[in-house]
Amino acid sequence: MPIQAWERCLEYNDNRSLVTVEENGRGIKFINNKRKKVALYRVDDCILTEGIKCDFLFLINEDKRAFFIELKGSDLEKAVQQISKTIEQLHPYLPEYILEGRIITTRVRTPALNLRISLDYKKYCEKQAEH
């Protein structure tokens, strides 16, 4: 079920088997074999219009899972910050959901990944789970 206040930001809300999130040549695909009801919301300049925010919010309503998605070229540190800030602002609207972040990059090689960013984000998620 879509969150009423965010309805204008809803890209889709259905049980499609292939879920695609794309913007500016970047994207991610989820396979929805069990055809669960999924919803995709545009966060950037729709749900949130000011401050630091990620691009999209993807919900699997049956499983109560929320994925905060940032499609990024190469700035991983900024992407983590965008997801973290969005979670801070939207988690009160998703109290029963498991919150996860996904960063989709196009110009980062695996050796360039910064472990500190991952650890900082993991610590942030653990802290949020305690509340």
Image (cartoon, helix red, strand yellow):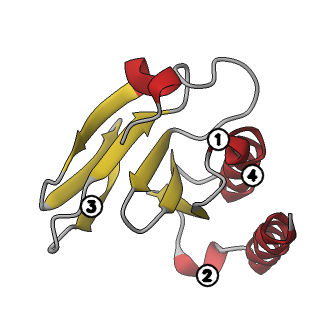
Left or right: where does residue 64 sit relative to residue 123?
A: left
Q: Position of residue 72 (x, y in %)?
A: 53, 48
The mark that comes first in sequence, 4 or 1, is 4
Q: Are marks 3 and 1 in contact (CB under 8 Å)?
A: no
Q: Residues within 10 Å of mark 3 (few under 14, many from 20)?
A: few
Q: Residues within 10 Å of mark 4 (few under 14, many from 20)?
A: many
Mark 3 — residue? 29
Q: Residues within 10 Å of mark 1 (few under 14, many from 20)?
A: few
Q: Nearer the viewer, mark 4 or mark 2?
A: 4
Q: Are marks 3 and 2 in contact (CB under 8 Å)?
A: no
**Residue in the foreground of this view, choosing between 106 and 19:** 19
> In the image, what residue occupies the spot 16% across and 73% down?
34
Q: Nearer the viewer, mark 3 or mark 1?
A: 1
Mark number for residue 111? Answer: 2
Q: Are marks 1 and 2 in contact (CB under 8 Å)?
A: no
Q: Amino acid at mark 3?
A: Lys
Q: Residues within 10 Å of mark 2 (few under 14, many from 20)?
A: few
Relative to 79, say whether 6 is above or below.
above
Q: Position of residue 29 (x, y in %)?
A: 27, 61
Q: Nearer the viewer, mark 4 or mark 1?
A: 1
**Residue in the foreground of this view, choosing between 53 and 96:** 96
The mark that comes first in sequence, 3 or 2, is 3
- In the structure shown, which secondary structural element does the residue marked by tag 3 occupy? strand
The mark that comes first in sequence, 4 or 2, is 4
Relative to 49, say whether 103 is above or below.
below
